[in-house]
Amino acid sequence: MLENVIEFSDWEKLDLRVAQIKKVEEIEGADKLYKLILDVGELGERIVCAGIKPYYSVEELQGMKVILIANLAPRKLRGIESQGMLLAAAGVKKDKCVLLTIEKDIEPGTKIS
């Protein structure tokens, strides 16, 4: 049985968008976080801090198209305002983390439904 079942109206509140990683920056003193600059098409650029450093190199992330929760309330991490969250799957033992990516080419900012 699934826990925390939500109503369809809750799902409709999420604004999921295709985002392309334009720049990846190290955050001083952070072992797990990268600062990512994302192109979200008509929504412009967004900054997102993501705890994916142990799983991805800067080179692997550059240009990748990922899925962004665009309407998540901003949150400060290490003094940086993170403006959304990337969707990822984590291994059961937390030994893996895989970003959810886009299979075929589509424009940044495309709404996911």
Image (spheres, rainbow, N blue to C red):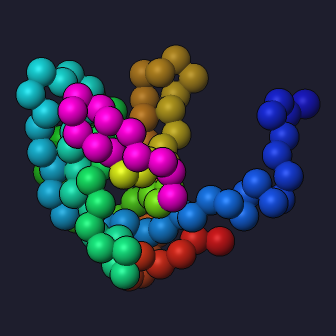
Does the magenta run of residues contain 61? no
Write the residue at 26% across / 67% down. Answer: 45
* Residue 59 placement (x, y as % from top left): 14, 51
* Magenta highlight range: 71-82
* Residue 112 placement (x, y as % from top left): 57, 71
Write the residue at 29% across / 32% down. Answer: 77
Q: Residue furthest top?
A: 93
* Residue 108 placement (x, y as % from top left): 37, 76
Relative placement, left or right, of 92 versus 76 is: right
Does the magenta run of residues contain 78? yes
Write the residue at 43% across / 29% down. Answer: 96
- Image quarter of the C terminus: bottom right
Residue 105 at least partly seen: no
Relative placement, left or right, of 97 versus 9 is: left
Relative placement, left or right, of 54 versus 26 is: right
- Name which quarter of the figure residue 38 lies in: bottom left
* Residue 98 placement (x, y as % from top left): 43, 42
Q: Residue furthest right?
A: 1
Q: Identify whether 94 is placed above or below 23.
A: above
- Image quarter of the N terminus: top right
Write the residue at 39% across / 39% down. Answer: 75
Q: Identify whether 111 is placed above or below 87.
A: below
Give the number of marks.
Answer: 0
Q: Identify whether 24 is placed above or below 76.
A: below
Residue 18 at least partly seen: yes
Q: Identify whether 55 is placed above or below 60.
A: above
- Name which quarter of the figure residue 51 lies in: top left
Depth order, front residue of 109/64 = 109
Relative placement, left or right, of 38 versus 105 is: left
